[in-house]
Image (cartoon, rainbow, N blue to C red):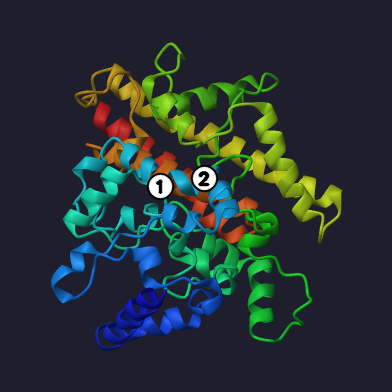
Amino acid sequence: MQTKAASHQECIECHKQVTPRIVRDWELSVHSDDINDVSCSVCHGDSHMGKDDVYKAEPVTSRTCQACHEDQWQEFSQGKHSKAWKAMKAMPTMHWQPMALTSGMKGCGGCHKIGFKTQEEVADLKKEGGGFGLASCDACHTRHTFSVQEARQPQACRTCHTGFDHPQWEMYQGSKHGTRNELKQLGVLDDSAAAPTCQTCHMVQGNHEVKTAWGFLGLRLPLPEDDPEWAQARVTIFQALGVLDQQGQPTDRFKVIADLDFLRQTEEDWDREREEMLTVCRDCHSNNFAQGELAKGDQMIRQADLLMARAIDLVADLYDRGVLEQPEGYARAFPDVLAFHNAPSSIEQKLFRMFQEYRMRSFQGTFHANPDYALWYGWSRMQQTLTEMQEMARRMTE
């Protein structure tokens, strides 16, 4: 026991000279309390002894945290965040991106690193120089303080849930929910005033699973039998995602999307997540109000899907008529909206933005109670983009 304490003290004294702010963060954490017995070697191993063997320090992963936080780890492992790294790697053009953006964590990987990684992936990342910040947990509980209080603030979500296709932070911040929470943080409103945070709605009672009824893509199964127009639009979008073939049958990509939990696949799954959200809403609102507001989000998805399907069919028609060359490797007569910014023509680039940016903002803005994002950054831009694509198609045909 004495040897362990001495070794731990050596780590502290050395790192006070080399990385003093890391030591200070650790000292501020509950880990530094003697009663918790979390020394440096508990997380980083005991092989690293000095400046010449830094590479021997063990990378910290979520499995490291699991040793003490089993319940939270189990919850996290059932949610979408745990699949984030796998989701990034599954994107069809991901291998075309600069390594610094993916494995280097300076783009996609900077947020998607929250997901689980295999031991082989962790080893490869360490070799490539991207072996830091792999714990998943530290995406919200910043190392080395690992503060619970920090992770409970909506700002903890801001780094990743902002920008192009998921500006939830901006939507929330500008909504009445976000405005009231900011006023509470500033001390203008009493601390007991109702002001939900991201965690209030998406991490009920601290549950680390984090799932929603519609899922990230705003798509689900089964198809609505009582609304054939919406059902057909949804099929068209599934085909552009590559998860259904021209005959409407599941593809290999469907298995990937399903495994990543991008969408609810049964009515029961969707109902369960919707009821959980309604339970949260009813803390502040009447049941009728809550149901009505969420139903508006459902209808916004429907309207956005109808527009999106028209845009997809427009590009597919250009393929069929030979006006637009279908990219090599496309196994179906539909554009691939998962090609992202690597889409090979301007009109396909517009289609990608329409799906990934404007459609997402239309329904996300509605669910997050931000009218500006729902209308001007979402629905309005979808309408404008479809008009621009129709004009481009006419010129290309001529």
Viewer-closest of 338 and 125: 125
**First in sequence: mark 2 vs mark 1:** 2
Q: Position of residue 178 (x, y in %)?
A: 63, 69
Residue 116's label in the rendered image is: 1
- Crowding at label 1, few (<14), some or many (≥20) Cα neighbours within 10 Å? many
**In the rendering, at what x and y percent does residue 217 appear?**
50, 40
Q: Could you tell me if the residues under marks 2 and 1 are in contact, i.e. CB atoms within 8 Å?
A: yes
- Between the C-alphas of marks 2 and 1, the distance is 8 Å
Residue identified by numbered label 2: 77
Displayed quadrant of residue 365:
bottom right
Residue drawn at (69%, 87%), measured in percent from left and top? 187
| Position of residue 293 in the picture relative to residue 266 (left or right) | right
Amino acid type, residue under disc 1 in the picture = Phe
Query: Is 77 left, or right, of 106 in this rendering?
Result: right
Q: Residue at x 36, y 35 (%)?
A: 337
Secondary structure at numbered mark 2: helix
The quadrant of the image that shows the N terminus is bottom left
Under mark 2, the amino acid is Ser
Asked if residue 27 is positioned above or below residue 131 in the image, the reply reads: below
